[in-house]
């Protein structure tokens, strides 16, 4: 769980470390698939304006599909997050700012982890630069070798 009791920040900053399982509710609606627990390590700081600045490193692994051969591709994720949690309605449109209810007693970092991961997951994945893809005619995976319809002599 990555929920911080904000009363702990009266004196400045707190370490935030934790793990989020792929089954964590924070990841319920994402369109990527996590294969390992996500580890989070960072520091949450109270700013002069009463906002909370969070700097963290997030690591995990995502499974995607190769665009060429449709095979599994595992993508190591290692991202740095710098975000602000603010109850100031004027910052609501700012992409780097997460809204925080006025007088909130705690802060759930899971949502920010989830959204920052979603932004970082590459949209176009290939299992390797040399992936041969699928035969457009018979659908055979050409990484396993040439298919029979690929032979020049095999005209239909
Ligand atoms: Zn591939
Ligand atoms: Zn073929």
Image (spheres, rainbow, N blue to C red):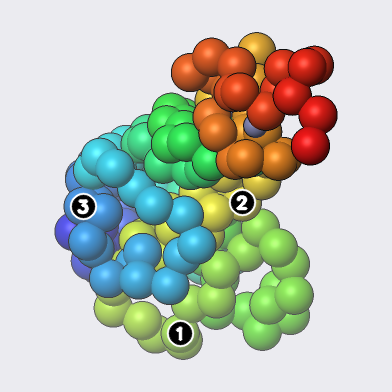
Q: Which mark is residue 119?
A: 2
Q: What element does badge 3 sit on?
A: loop
Up-down: is 83 above or below 143? below
* Residue holding disc 3: 21
In the image, is the residue at mark 1 within 8 Å of ligand 1 by its beta carbon? no
Mark 1 Cα shell of 10 Å, populated few (<14), some (14-19), many (≥20) = some
Point out residue 16 in the picture as x, y percentages from the top left corner: 28, 45
**Mark 3 → mark 2, Cα distance in angstroms:** 19 Å
Q: Quadrant of ligand 2?
A: top right
Point out residue 20 in the picture as x, y percentages from the top left corner: 24, 51
- C-beta proximity under 8 Å, tags 1 and 3: no
- C-beta proximity under 8 Å, tags 3 and 2: no
Q: Which mark is residue 79?
A: none
Is residue 150 shown left or right of residue 144?
right
Q: Nearer the viewer, mark 1 or mark 3?
A: 3
Q: Which mark is residue 101?
A: 1
Up-down: is 106 above or below 110? below
Up-down: is 75 above or below 92? above
Instruction: Kindly tell me whether residue 43 is visible in this rendering.
Output: no
If the image is split into quadrants, where does the N terminus sit? bottom left
Q: Residue at x 28, y 78 (%)?
A: 105
């Amino acid at each position: 769980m990555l929920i911080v009791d904000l009363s702990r920040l009266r004196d400045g900053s707190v370490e935030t470390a934790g793990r989020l399982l792929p089954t964590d509710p924070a990841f319920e609606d994402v369109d990527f698939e996590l294969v390992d627990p996500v580890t989070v390590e960072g520091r949450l700081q109270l700013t002069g304006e009463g906002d909370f600045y969070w700097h963290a490193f997030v690591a995990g692994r995502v499974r995607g599909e190769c665009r060429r051969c449709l095979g599994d591709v595992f993508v190591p994720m290692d991202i740095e997050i710098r975000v602000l949690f603010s109850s100031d309605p004027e910052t609501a449109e700012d992409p780097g700012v997460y809204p925080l209810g006025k007088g909130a007693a705690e802060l759930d970092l899971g949502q920010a982890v989830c959204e920052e991961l979603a932004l970082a997951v590459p949209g176009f994945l290939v299992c390797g630069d040399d992936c041969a893809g699928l035969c457009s005619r018979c659908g055979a995976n050409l990484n396993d070798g040439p298919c029979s319809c690929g032979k020049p002599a095999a005209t239909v």
